[in-house]
Amino acid sequence: CKTKGGVNYIIPIILIILVCSIIITSTYILIPNYIEPKPSKKDTTDSIKNISYTIPKGFTKSKYESENYKSYSYTKDDKYCNIGIEAYDYKSLYKDAEEYIKANVYVSAEDTINPIDKITLNNTTWIHMSTENEYQTKDIYAKKEGNTFYKIETRNTKYQPSCTEEYQKILNSITEKEQ
């Protein structure tokens, strides 16, 4: 081989570097998808569009989120809490938050739908609707700001301790950003 042109070390070195690059890149892309997020050790402030809020310690932020939707869960002492916060621009699709909430809340035939009311969260008026069935109670809060509709959804499972206190901390922390 040496007399016919020698041994070329460049190709095996390039192949080794290429294989190592593929392995390292795959690790950085795939591993985060398999690592479960951990509960926060302190209260954290987060935001979506024009509102910000504080998530109490112990909640885990979902890794499946977008610029329009975020969710958080809390599991401790047989208590499971889940809150979803979303913000979508619908321009003229809905005239107000009440129409929006009616169109975007999914209920089954077994659900009891309580009357829609208005509540104040941190000096801002929100439309509130709650539904319940034999398994859970769901509270939905909505408001319209410009063309953006905000919706917050919480759930309490009837066979586990209530998450009302945890949800109230989040709801009471909601503030609008200055525009």
Image (cartoon, rainbow, N blue to C red):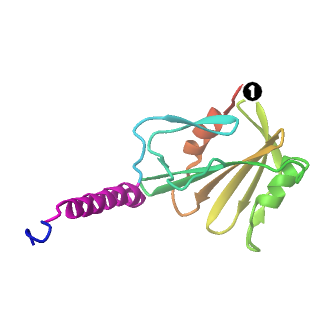
Q: In this view of the protein, can residue 115 be seen by the observer?
A: no
Q: Is residue 114 left or right of residue 65?
A: right
Expressed as whole percent of the image width and height from the top left, the position of residue 125 reads 80, 36
Q: Is residue 29 magenta?
A: yes
Q: Nearer the viewer, residue 87 or 142?
A: 87
Which residue occupies 42% across, 47% down?
A: 39
Q: Which residues are magenta?
A: 7-36
User: Percent x, y for residue 75?
Assistant: 45, 54
Q: Position of residue 44 (x, y in %)?
A: 50, 35
Q: Residue furthest top?
A: 178
Neighbour class for label 1 at 10 Å: few (<14), some, many (≥20)?
few
Horizontal relation, residue 171 to residue 62: left or right: right
Quadrant including the C terminus? top right
Q: Pick the residue in front: 116 or 36.
A: 36
Does residue 174 appear to the left or right of 150 in the view shown?
left
On whether residue 19 falls in the magenta region, the answer is yes
Q: How many marks?
A: 1
Q: Residue at 70% across / 35% down in the picture?
A: 50
Is label 1 in a helix, a strand or a loop?
loop
Type of residue at label 1?
A: Gln
Return the residue at label 1: 179
Residue 33 image point, x, y percent: 42, 59
Q: Answer whether residue 120 is visible to the viewer in this image.
A: yes
